Image (cartoon, grey):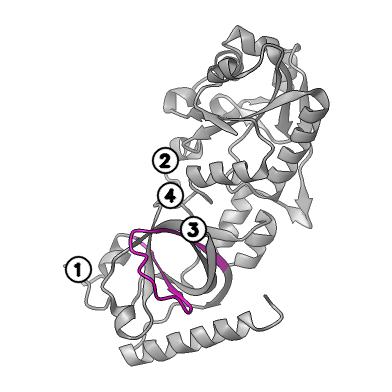
Amino acid sequence: MKIVDNIDKIINELGSNDQIGITIGNFDGVHLGHKKLLSEVYEECLKLNLKFILITFVPHPKMILVPNLDKNYLINTYIERRELLQELKVIDFLVEMNFTRDFSLLSPFDFIQKKLLENQNIGTILKKLFLGHDFSFGANKSGDISFIREKFPNLDVKEHKMFTKNSAISSTIIRNLIKSGDIKEAEELLGRKYFISGIVMKSKGLGRKIGFPTANLDYSEFVVIPKRGVYLTSTEINGFLYRSVTNVGFNPTTDKEDKDVNGEVSNKTNHIFKLETYILDYNSNIYGDRIKVYFEKRIRDEITFSSIEELKKQIEDDVTFARNFINSDHT
């Protein structure tokens, strides 16, 4: 899969007789519905001997168009989306178009004409456009599949039906499940475990002092964060998976003294969740390393304890729960 920021740039990469099929969308999370669509497009491109082009956008259009959008919006970072799409091994070219305010004001006609067909060679070799049933585009999302068929009759457009798994699947539904702490249901719709990746940064080191050293994750400020609480997780380090327990929240017990001038906990005032992971049976130094934390099950709410000893006892109980869970039939 080759990655470009403009569809024109694929021309020089193609053979003289190559023809292409294109699909367009955000594909945040690369969930089961996305995978079904991409699999279907891939199979059709194989039958028609077409190169498969996927067009998507950076940043996500809603991050430009919705003023009050929750900052923690994306299921995955754009780099993670690339990696997830690459793993499917079905796409020849990924076109990541730069989405701006001016871009958002393009009429549906101009979007097709200027962003898709401006290069005459593209119009010549584009043999099929594969779109999801709810595809909409252009200013105020005023364009749809019917518009393309009416205004661009020479474009062969195939509409793909919505894929369901007992119920509808969408990135919006999955975001809401993650926010509510329903990790297992989110996993069902993603078709994979939900994860957050980031760099391990140094913290106050209290966990190490009480016998439970944690990896404090510096994650993207734009990704959706699970509901506050403690989770059974797995942590990927250098390609290997280790069982772990992760706290998502503001560390109310250990941060009691970290207050601002108004008496509020500093991190809470800035709305910054901490993701701290205790990795079972792992003692190596991973400061500065990039890791992935895969969420598997929500264990309990985040609790404020009256003492560090109470906190330590609860962590011991959480680790015991994790070990018992690992050894049960739930693995």
Give whichever of discs 4 and 3 has the lower sequence position.
Answer: 3
Residue found at the far top of this picture = 120
**Identity of the amino acid at label 1?**
Asn
**Identity of the amino acid at label 4?**
Phe
Give the residue number, with chain letter if any, for mark 3.
196
Instruction: Judge whether 49 appears above or below 299 on screen.
Output: above
Give whichever of discs 1 and 3 has the lower sequence position.
Answer: 3
Query: Which dot, 3 or 2, sits closer to the camera?
Result: 3
Query: Which dot, 1 or 4, sits closer to the camera?
Result: 4
Q: Residue at the spot x=59%, y=15% of the render?
A: 11
- Residue 145 visible? The answer is no
How crowded is the residue under tag 1: few (<14 C-alpha within 10 Å), some, or many (20+)? few
User: Which quadrant holds the N terminus?
Assistant: top right
Front position in the image: 144 or 26: 26
Residue 37 appears left or right of 260? right
Residue 73: x and y, percent? 48, 50
Give the residue number, with chain letter if any, for mark 4.
222
Query: Which dot, 4 or 3, sits closer to the camera?
Result: 3
Give whichever of discs 2 and 4 has the lower sequence position.
Answer: 2
Q: Which mark is residue 67?
A: 2
